[in-house]
Amino acid sequence: MIGLQPEGDIDWSSYRGVMVFVEQRNGQAKPVSWQLIGEATRLAAKLNVKVMALVIGWQVSELAEESIYHGADEVYVCDSKELEHYRTRPYSRVCLHVIRKYKPEIVLMGATNTGRDLAGAIATHLPTGLTADSTQLDVDEERLLLASRPAFSEKMLATILCKQFKPQMATARAGVFEQLPRDTTRTGEVIQVPPQMDPGEIATEMIEFLETKGSVNLAEAEVIVAGGRGLGGPAAFEMLKELADELGGVVGASRAVVDLGWIGHDHQVGQTGVTVRPKLYFAIGISGAVQHVVGMQNSSYIVAINKDANAPIFKIANYAIVGDLFQIIPAIIQAVRTR
Ligand code: FAD
């Protein structure tokens, strides 16, 4: 048990504020944390409450300042060597302590591996529910969080609300919400929180951190070069990889080519893949089906290359190149190399 306390009679009206868990690794915040603080700012303005941020780790005090620059009004920081690496129980205990003491009415986390694990662990110890993997957030006139997420094999969008209890909790996908411009003139309050270690706990120690080989981090990429069925086969992805390498980006894909086995599922962008928000997105030989577009339409710049001038992808493209990708991509690579 992590330390579940009986809740007894609780005055739910004392719960105020929207709190975001600022996920970090080695002192670097995950972009989804700033995106969620951006969204929390919008929700907090509607509720007329403050934006709270929770930072847990080791030597993470700079992230408290960064949280304020990104929109937080109040930051809770638990900085301890024992919390250097994420572990479910020690992190859960800190979260539970902060939630019980400072009473946010809404708690948001990224739908990352860590966020999913932590939010689930916390929710089991609070008298509340959890909406996982949200893609839309709002609040209604009764101050209830309306968290929407794809449901029934992604065929519909379900809005889930937790009617009675606080805090209302949701994890949300990376790349969906917009972070606010970083504003170094913002000020806020930083509150130190002691680590909530349990001496009786079976001690676990992180020995080594191994990155998964070959996996691609689409959600955090600034440049994505994505290919679809127009590539004609898996070999053409080599060409896309070349372009991505030149631009410091990664390779994405439509579901059609993932289903065909031309590239792994971790490259898939879209409704049943990853939602992305890069600065630059190339859609190459991709028609622009709605299930693909929902996953990449928030990219800052979209360059679409398609031989069909009527391809739907051109409706959302900033730059439309009509032609054969096998002629256009080598020319772009050449141009990038000689710039
Ligand atoms: P196509 O639609 O076949 O398009 C290929 C394009 O390549 C065409 O526009 C063609 O003109 C162009 N082309 C062909 N040759 C060339 C050439 N030589 N040069 C230039 N252009 C060329 N899809 C996703 O991508 N992501 C998802 O997450 C996703 N989730 C889904 C969930 C559900 C429940 C369902 C039902 C579908 C989902 N889909 C998803 C599938 C989606 O509906 C489309 O089938 C898919 O996106 C099409 O992939 P595509 O654009 O690569 O292929």
Image: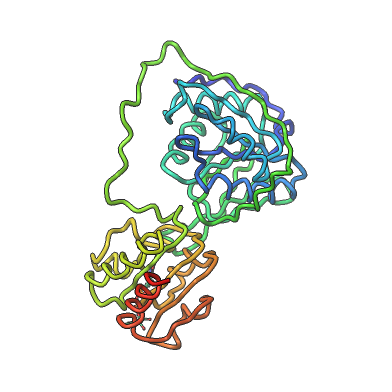
How is the protein colored in the picture?
A: rainbow
Question: Residue 184 appears in which quarter of the rendering?
Answer: top right
Q: What residue appears at the point 77 percent right and 44 percent down from the top-left corner?
A: 48
Q: Residue furthest right?
A: 48
Residue 89 spot, x, y in % from top left:
44, 25
Residue 141 in the figure: left or right of residue 285: right
Q: Nearer the viewer, residue 3 or 227?
A: 227
Q: What residue appears at the point 51 percent right and 34 percent down from the top-left corner?
A: 123
Q: What residue appears at the point 39 percent right and 82 percent down from the top-left corner?
A: 306
Question: Residue 300 appears in which quarter of the rendering?
Answer: bottom right
Residue 263 spot, x, y in % from top left:
27, 63
> Which quadrant holds the N terminus?
top left
Residue 162 in the figure: left or right of residue 242: right
Q: Residue furthest top?
A: 199
The vertical placement of 84 against 337, above or below, is above
The vertical placement of 310 against 299, above or below, is below
Residue 221 spot, x, y in % from top left:
44, 56
Residue 59 shows in the view: yes
Which image quarter has ligand 1? bottom left
Q: Nearer the viewer, residue 258 or 227?
A: 227
Residue 47 spot, x, y in % from top left:
74, 46
> Which quadrant holds the C terminus?
bottom left
The vertical placement of 81 against 264, above or below, is above
Residue 165 shows in the view: no
